[in-house]
Image (cartoon, rainbow, N blue to C red):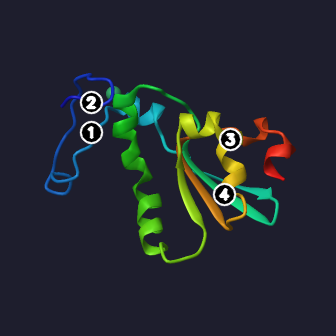
Amino acid sequence: MICKLCDKIYSESLSFKTLFQIRILCPECLMQYEPTYTYEVIPIERGIIEYHSVFMIEDNDPKKKRILYRFMKSYFKALMSDYLNEGLTLLIEDTEYTNFPQWFPIIKGLSPLRFYSLFYYDWSNYEDSVWF
Ligand SMILES: [Zn+2]
């Protein structure tokens, strides 16, 4: 088989049990891109932000990002079952993170806020003046 991330050829034994659950990543990529599923609560003025991320590493290769988004499946399932709740849910990527001080003051009155990202972003880089 060919790994979808690194294009390396690898072998895997198949059985009736695994016939329809074929892994798309080689063993090396599975170890390198093991999901960590972090969760943080960030206090803001009149509320909180629940921040979820899948990986502690960062990789800006668009092809890899596209493949790795499948690890957010559990988040999307939770969102689909929880979509009627109040608040705002945002998918954060590099653009949103770098421009955060510009758009966040507009939405910070909404609560609860939920941020989801594929790769972890360190929100402590931003000053308290942005949060409050
Ligand atoms: Zn690989």
Secondary element type, mark 4: helix
At label 4, the amino acid type is: Ile
Query: Is the residue at mark 2 in contact range of ligand 1, meaning its CB lies under 8 Å from it?
Result: yes
Say which residue label 1 marks: 24
- Residue nearer the viewer, 24 or 95: 95
Secondary element type, mark 2: loop
Horizontal arrangement in the rendering, residue 45 relative to residue 13 (left or right): right
Say which residue label 2 marks: 3
Give residue 1's quadrant in the image: top left
The picture places residue 84, in percent across and down from the top left corner, at: 49, 77
* Mark number, residue 107: 4
Say which residue label 3 marks: 102
Q: Which of marks 3 and 2 is nearer the N terminus?
A: 2
Q: Which of marks 4 and 2 is nearer the N terminus?
A: 2
How far is mark 4 from mark 2, CA to CA? 40 Å
- Residue nearer the viewer, 47 or 8: 47
How far is mark 3 from mark 2, CA to CA? 39 Å
Q: What residue appears at the point 35 percent right and 33 percent down from the top-left corner? A: 27
Q: Which residue lies furthest to the bottom in this view?
A: 84
At label 2, the amino acid type is: Cys
- Residue nearer the viewer, 106 or 25: 106
Assess whether mark 2 and mark 1 are in contact (beta carbons under 8 angstroms). Answer: yes
Q: Which of marks 1 and 4 is nearer the N terminus?
A: 1
